[in-house]
Each structure stands twice: as structure tokens, then as C-alpha cells.
Amino acid sequence: MKRRHFIQSTAAYAAGAALLPKSLSAAKKIAASDKIRIGAIGIHGMGWTDLTNLLKHPEAECIALCDVDNNVLNQRVDELKQQNINVTAYGDYRKLLENKDIDAVMIATPDHWHCKIMVDACMAGKDVYCEKPVGNSIIECATMVAAQKKYNRVVQVGQWQRSNKHYADAMDFVHSGKLGNVRLVKAWAYQGWMQSVPVKPDSAPPAGVDYDMWLGPAEKRPFNPNRFHFNFRWYWDYAGGLMTDWGVHMIDYALQGSKAIAPKSIMASGGKFAYPDDAEQTPDTLVTVYDFGSFNMLWEHATGINDGPYQRDHGVAFIGNNGTLVVDRGGWEVIPEVKSDKNQMDAVARQPKVDDGIFLHTGNFLEVVKSRKMEDLKCPVQDAAHVATVCDMGNIAFRTGRKIYWDDEKKNFDDKDANMLLAAKYHNGYELPKV
């Protein structure tokens, strides 16, 4: 699926369209005592998409919403009420977690809040569906894994491509060995719809917004509309730019196909080449090289450009001696290597997507909440933390401007400046959760 089409679909949800298809919600009757009661924390963008997909499953029931923007909160309460769903509204997630009737929470706040809320939710005995990237630093990722283990809660991360059949089929083909020796893996996101963010002056927060709660552990700064809602992802205080926004999806499959754990070294080059004078901090253009010892993984991203490798605006390519497998959200195919006018393997025509990843992914979460079989999760927090850690390594290499080397036993770099970026700094009286 093209990212812009995905955003358009999200916008349709935001307008209240197709919230609860009656054919799905009425297909299976679930006793009230068997319902999984959900509290949703962060309901503006992907949070609303996640919640609407959770509610397509008849065993899910939303009983609470939380958002620091009262304008969004009131809108969502009204939209649910139109579907005969009555919820309790909260402006502080901690009050929501005190609600003993809630079984599970959905977290879709800005990235800098994920760790704190997820750990608090596990401590409160709630299962968790958390948006990606799971943490906003390498240390946060490790903390979230430790919390899941300590409190034994179901934690699914919203890397929903893991529930698409065509991605699983593509990985099976890569693992079959038919591509031959795979020495280079490419992953990329070229996002033409992402345009420049114009500089805007600081201002008072909009009426109804609890800006102090929005900041949470992030550094205290004057409100600026560019740092709010969707565009928070372009500021180091709250997120990791396109590297973590799309990288966790694409690099996830680069790592799965390669069965790779930790890189030996990472180097990155890029910057604000497309929009040097706009308001974003994170690079709009970036190339990152990971050395895994027996192969290299290359990450590329660019905003304002759609035509990426293999004429795809996103994807992963496994480049082997016999051929190359290319997979994206729409399907996968194999392009043979040609030597002396002879194909080194049979081509595989494009195998298209056949299912709805987000719907299946939210359903998988609910199934495991009931079964408690953690091994059945499509994207447990351990896997998501691994991917987010590798993406964070790329950002750290970029920010230090040096080739850095990772010691997987010590869980740190050979570089003092790189190690300073292992943990996100907490402010305003907040501390990294202790697990």
C-alpha cells in the first residue's frame, strides 16, 4: 500500500467513516463477561486507526479514552457515542490506569511517552497494544522488555506488517536459499507526500490542550505548532525521524530475512538536503550502512521523493548471487540475476497482498490476551525492541558523525559520544522507569 493511500484511509477513519462495520461487529456474539475491555491512550492519528481496528473484533469493547488534547478527546467520545459506545474520558493516562474495569490499553502517544506509559500499564496489570517504535532510545527499549518480563503482560507492538501473509511468504522464500548468498540487503522509505515543514513562531498552546502533560518527560520548551500532533516525529526530543518512523517497518524485515541480531558497526551520512531551512531537526535525506559481518544492510530514506529503488517508494530487497527478492506492502517478487544472457534462477511474478494487516494484527493481540500464549504474538515487545534498537543505532551514527562499533555483550558503543545517546534524557520531574 502506498503510504499516501494509507494516510488517506486514516483520514477517513478520523472523519468517522466506517468505524464499526456492522457485518463484522454483528458476525459473532460475545458474552459481556468475555469481552476484553480496552482503554485507548492517544487517539488522534494512528491511535484512532488502531482503536477502530480493535473494535472490528466482536470480543473488544472500548470503555475509556485518554488524550491531552480535549478537542480530540471530545470529538472521539462523540463519534463513539454515535455508534452506541459510551466511554469514560480522561486527560491523564494515570487516572485511566486506575480503572479496574480495563483489561488492556492501546498506546499511541508521541514516541517519547511510550516507555513510561507501557511500563506503568504493565505495573497496573493491563495488557498493552503499543504503537511503534516501541521506545525512543536503546535504554528505553531494554526497559520495556524488562517490564513485560517482570509483570508477565501481553505486549503487542503495532508493526502490523508481521500479520500480512505475503510478508511471511517472502521471508520463507528468502530462507529457502534459492537467492544464493545474500551479501547486501536494502531497506528504504522514499516519501514524496512528506513535504517541508515551514518555520512557525512559538505561541500559546491551543485551548483545551494540556501542554505540560503532552511534554511529559521531554525538555520544557515553548509551545510550537510544528512540534505538535503528526510533526512531533521530526524532533529529537520526541522521536527519531523517518529512521524510526518507517525504519522499524522496513528494517524489521531486513533483519528477519537475514536472521540478523546486532551489527558490528554502523555509519550514516545525510542531512537536511531537501529542505535545509525548514523547521525539522531530523534528516530529510539519510543513508545508513550496517555491517553484520557476513553481509551489509543499507537503509535509505528521503522525503519529497517517491521514486526509490526498484521504482518503489518503500520496500526491502535481498540481493543474492542468483537473484533479488523485493517486498513491499503491496506484494513481493523475485528478479533473477542474469549472467551470459542466462537467468541464474527462475523469476517469481509479483505475489500480491491478500489480507488486511492491521485488522489481523489487532485480532492476534486479542487472541493472545485470551489465551495468554505469548509465543503466538506476531510482534512481541522483545522483537520490536530489537528492531527499534537497530534503528536507534543508525540515528546515533548520524548524530555523532562517525562510524561507531557496537559491543553486543556490553550493550554499548566504543564511542563516548555515542554512549551518551543510549538513553533519552527525562525532564520535568519524570524519571526513566525502574524495573
Image (tube, helix red, strand yellow):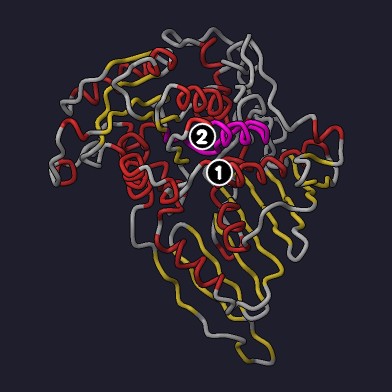
In the rendered image, the vertical position of residue 102 relative to residue 359, given as above or below? above
Q: Which residue is mark 1?
A: 382
Q: Is residue 181 above or below residue 119?
A: below
Circle on res. 141: none
Please say if the residues under marks 2 and 1 sit with CB atoms less than 8 Å apart. yes
Q: Is residue 73 visible?
A: yes
Quarter holding the N terminus is: bottom left
In the structure shown, which secondary structural element does the residue marked by tag 2 occupy?
helix
* Range of residues picked out in magenta: 128-149
Q: Where 205 falls versus 379 (above or below)?
A: above
Give the crowd class for mark 1: few <14, some 14-19, many >=20 residues within 10 Å.
some
Q: From the viewer's perspective, is residue 252 above or below residue 132?
A: below
Residue 25 position within the rendered picture, expressed as x and y whole percent measured from the top left? 17, 41
The one of 153 and 329 positioned closer to us in this rendering: 153
The residue at the point 67 percent across, 28 percent down is: 236
Q: Looking at the image, tell me whether mark 2 or mark 1 is earlier in sequence order.
A: 2
* Kind of residue at disc 2: Gln
Q: Amino acid at mark 1?
A: Gln
Residue at which label 2 appears:
148
Q: Residue at x 58, y 26 (%)?
A: 112
- Can residue 68 be seen in the rendering of this structure? no
